[in-house]
Image (cartoon, helix red, strand yellow):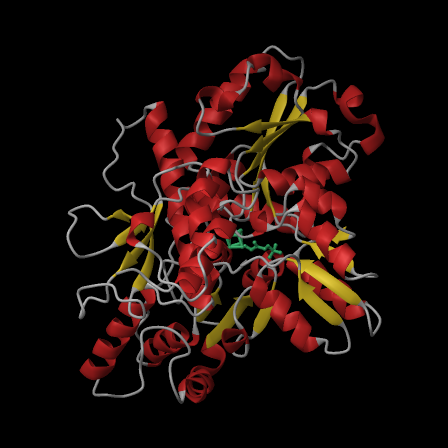
Amino acid sequence: MPIVAKNLQRAVELYLACAYPDGVPASVQGKAGPVMALEAEALAPVELFERSEGGGEGSYVLRLGQPMYPFMKLVIDPVPEQGTVSPTSYLLRADAHDRHLHAPAGSPDAAWLASVRVSNRDLVEKIEAAWAKAGLPTFKEYLRAKLAARRAKKEGGGDKVARGQGGRGTGERIAARKAELGERLVILGHHYQCDEVVGFVDVLGDSFQLAREAAKLTRAEYVVFCGVYFMAESADVLTGDHQKVILPDLDAGCSMADMAKIDDVQRAWGVINEACADIDGFKLVPITYINSSAAIKAFVGEHGGTVCTSSNCEKILAWAMDQKPKAQGLQSLGLSRKVLFFPDQHLGRNTAYKMSWPLESMVVWDYTQPRGGLSDEEIRKATFILWKGCCSVHQVFRAEHVDQARAKWPGVRVIVHPECCFEVVQKADLSGSTDLIGKTIAASPAGSKWAVGTEINMVRRLAKLHPDKQIELLGECECLCPTMARVDPARLLWVLDNLAERQVVNQVVVGEDVKRWARVSLQRMLDITK
Ligand code: 13P
Ligand code: SF4
């Protein structure tokens, strides 16, 4: 027996908003339409669903897919203790349905499959986070609650839990542990962390500020990084051997960073260099956004390039182009100097365009395609070769959200992060790093109206910090970064409890061979942007 229509409609609506930010294709609309047409209080009829594999009493499936992969599905499962779905008792799950696919290693299919898996995994996280936030029951939350209850029981019924706010007393216990660890501990936190974590960080900042801060820390024995994996890796590269960097949840990755794999980058490097070998004075400069693995940073360091962040990308690109005056552009460089920019095509395009480089000087390297999907001619003509990566959070903002904000809210100013797509950045009044967004809004006069296109935790915090201004999220996007959200007070307390016992858990360690060159590229960035 399926569920009450209005709950299903909300679940479908959120799924589609996450999966199809650029518009729902007609084929998918055909499946969602009958659901949306139901009376809110009616029960969704079973004919609307596929039954899950195995048939029998069990799960109900709506195969809504995603742009790269049509087999992904919305699943309604029974609560395990009950065995059957009832109108008011059920659990939602997004199922990528890609577990059984295999492709021979090194084949084009393998590259395609890998990128589909990354995209599916991110989307599943995003959809389930959106459901949980909307108060819909998800299988993941059910499992988390079960695990937390089991752990609490094992630990003697105390208020320790594996995740979430951590129950009563967590804040006091974190504060007590911080006091106990004193100067041996520094907690760094990114703007996208939730308020409950931000309340305990010693330094809150954007990716650049946090990297610079890590490089300055010499005394702290432990650096707890409330952010994502690539940030903790950078901190490990920039801190001394006597210091340990800890990430409260080792699964806090970054979908964008996962889009540039070292093998793919090495392959691209070879192809581009080969295609341009006979261009007089040819030089390819690799620039990686800090949102990338340490292995990628090492590659860049070893090949004469550097790292950039959203706050210094312009300076870094100017450095890469050898500080040539913008206006001379292509002519002065005679196409001999090219930048291979990864993983975020949007940051690369938005920044190069801002520096007066025309869109025609840029091509996109599709790492899922042989030779990046480009002809030798296209490669030779380009000045910027942009990796086809993106942020799953910022790609939900669309140009029409800017139009809608302006129509609904006369006088509003729109400010967005440069990980948003070109059209959004072009329509916005301003774009910049999380630090720039925060500072711009802080400096605006009372009564200012802002629609902000970045991660929801930061937008909510800005609204709280500036009650004299009107600050809203751009569009009505569910733009929570699911990996940043993995770090929560309970996990923070857990690592601090262990440190107090002199046990280091969740340490992030970059191997010495990678560290050597990754340090070169990060230090180069710090030197250029001093
Ligand atoms: P900044 O911290 O550079 O603004 O970037 C935002 C981001 O996506 C971090 O992953
Ligand atoms: Fe990665 Fe985007 Fe999250 Fe930043 S916001 S950590 S780029 S997924």
> Which corner quadrant of the image does residue 354 belong to?
top right
Residue at 39 percent of width and 88 percent of height: 168
Return the residue nearer the eye: 201 or 44. Answer: 44
Residue 318 lies, with reference to residue 178, above or below; the image says: above
How far from the left and from the top, in percent, is residue 383? 67, 25
Residue at 41 percent of width and 74 percent of height: 492
Residue 204 lies, with reference to residue 236, above or below; the image says: below
> Which corner quadrant of the image does residue 262 belong to?
top left
> Which corner quadrant of the image does residue 377 belong to?
top right
How far from the left and from the top, in percent, is residue 478? 53, 59
Side of 409 relative to 128 (left or right): right
Return the residue nearer the eye: 402 or 525. Answer: 402
How far from the left and from the top, in percent, is residue 138? 34, 64
Residue at 52 percent of width and 60 percent of height: 480
Residue 96 showing in the rendered view = yes
Locate ligand 1 by image quadrant.
bottom right
How far from the left and from the top, in percent, is residue 305? 58, 36
Residue 449 lies, with reference to residue 386, above or below; the image says: below
Side of 299 relative to 398 (left or right): left
